[in-house]
Amino acid sequence: MKKRKNPNPFAINKAFPSLILVLLLATFLRLYFLAQQPLVCDEGLIIAPNKIYFHDGILPFRNWHHPPFRYFFLYLSSLILGEQALSFRLLPVLFAVGSVLLCYCLAKHFFGEKTGLLAALLLATDPLHLAFSRLAFEESQLTFLILLALFLTFKYQENKNPLLLFFLGLASGFGMGTKWLYLPVYGFTLSYLAFFVLKERKFKVAIALLICLVLLPFAVYMSSFLPWFKRGYTLHDWFQFQFKMAKSIASVNITEYGDLIGYSSNPWLWFFRPLFFPYLFQTQNNTINSVSGFTNPFFWLIFPPSLIFLFFSSETKKIRPFIIAFLVFIFPLLLSTRPIYLYSATPVTAFLSIVVASAFSALLNKLNKHQNFTFLLKVYIIVAILFSLLLFPLEIGLPANSYSFYQTILNLYES
Amino acid sequence: MSSKNRAETQLLITILLSLFLSIALVVATFTTGFSNRKFYSGKTLQISLAKGKNFIEELEKRKVRGRKVVIFSNSLYAEIPQFIPSADGQTNVRNLACLLNYRTIKPANNNFIYLAILKGLVREVYLFLPDEEWRRRKFDFWSPFLKLKGNSIIGNYYEGTPFTVSSIRNFYNFNFKEKPVLIVNPSAFLNWKKFLNKIQPDLIFILEFEK
């Protein structure tokens, strides 16, 4: 693929109007019907203890083993906008739109504006990312922080601006404090940059790396427990608590959650079967009322071959570190012996969007003389995006009246 | 300024900014716990179980905060935090007002330890039962969120607060590391005073059941 010089991703250029349209689409899809959408149980688990954590340092009854930055932005939002469903859900929406923008920036960094726009469009319409970024929990925030960290890592490697390390350190601290699912990405960014710094033998940069990417994230992560520390706990108590959290997270098993465990909680199957995670699913009088996240099999099925194609093609080697980052992220989930719920695949949708968009762009470029084939590829993308949009009512709790039509689609899916 | 000097300056600014912020965060977080832990000069108080609310008032009045609590009792319900199903959002989840009122949900009035945890006054709880009681009722404590380990129920946290239940026979195997608040049911533990040499509490509550 032709190498392009990557300009400032935020500079106004020819792609800017198209990018704005994509961002507006992403915003609209995430704001429409947001206040009327029914609350789901996991939102309850986060909204209910939100204020009590900041006032009294009490961690929630059910999810005490997750780090508490997930509550920070929800609490901030409720302070500014009041305690209503819309205010709790607004920041996840903003993080989601930010993720779409970062998707564009990352894909553009690898293969140019058109790939960036396609990646942004895929994420903007992705039914899994869309469904879970409308809910007041941490998946949208986590996806944003993962993309931000990777973007800052690759930009630093390109222009060596040390201030990027500072922001990467902050993003890493917030990421770890949001959910420990961030940790593999942290491991990747630290190892990746350390490799180049040690190779170049720059002592001062190594010091900066140590402070920005080890000390600073640790300090930011620890500070998320400040309300908890206010109850009289010490650093020793805190370290013990981290071990307890890890043990509790690792010990989640089928017997504790019974009927909540289905096919969708096996990460291997995410790539090979159409899956959905129903928070709310009712059928009445030929109407389906559903708040669910769906995988789009048009993209998930071609995700692994796209990864392989991009990784081994000599023309697309610039994206190899990004693919390695994804593999580092997904392997702990694949190897895990405990159920992993489908909403944890929300960050995967961002990787998927960038990889699939890059693979499509590479193929279109490679086969531009074969017009029939390129036409088929474009039709495939359009059909796949339209399929994503078709699922929209089932993701947001909007009553879907075309019962037989949607039931036909749902028959393809497993939960 | 040459580009090399500019790069060096940026690097220095980054290092200093990150270092300053990290140290400030660590020091602020680290010192918060110690400064919030309040000890009392030591006085025995007597309260009756029915007046569970007074227990909380006494703790607040004496600014006893961030403390470990050791309980000698045979009572299952008064000390064990009760799970409040509606408080976790699983029920009434569509009612936002109910979720937001979670912090004001009152458990049973005799569940004063839970109330103390809820107010952030207590940071760790140890409950010791008479040996016979432990043998008879230890499986009553089992739940997915409290696990049996050896001769104690420990490990899983309730509301983020470590909670341990064991038999009095194991008492001397525990290392409390600081003086706790002691709550005693003297009718279950006639010779409770012999345990004071190990823990030396600064505050003792003696429970009297209403007749």
Image (spheres, coloured by chain):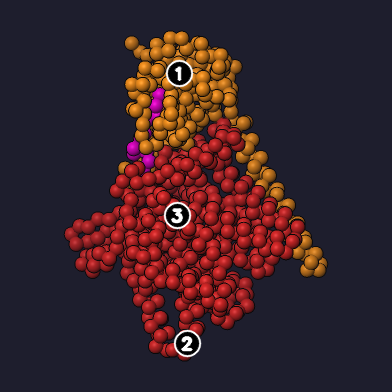
Mark 3 and mark 1 residues within 8 Å of each other at the beta carbon? no
Counting residues from the N terminus, which is met first, the one under dot 2 or under dot 3?
3
Q: Answer whether residue A122 is visible to the viewer in this image.
A: no
Q: How far apart, in angstroms, are the residues tagged by discs 1 and 2?
A: 80 Å
Q: Quadrant of the C terminus of chain A?
A: bottom left
Q: Which residue is mark 3?
A: A335
Q: Position of residue A78 (x, y in %)?
A: 47, 48
Q: What residue is drawn where x is 58% and y is 64%? A: A151
Chain drawn orange in the picture? B
Q: Colour of chain A?
A: red
Numbered label attached to residue A368 = 2
Chain identity of mark 3: A
- Residue A201, placed above or below residue A219: below
Q: Is residue B138 left or right of residue A206?
A: left
Chain identity of mark 2: A
Q: What residue is drawn where x is 50% and y is 29%? A: B124
Magenta range: B79-90
- Residue B200, placed above or below residue A149: above
Q: Neighbour class for label 2 at 10 Å: few (<14), some, many (≥20)? A: few
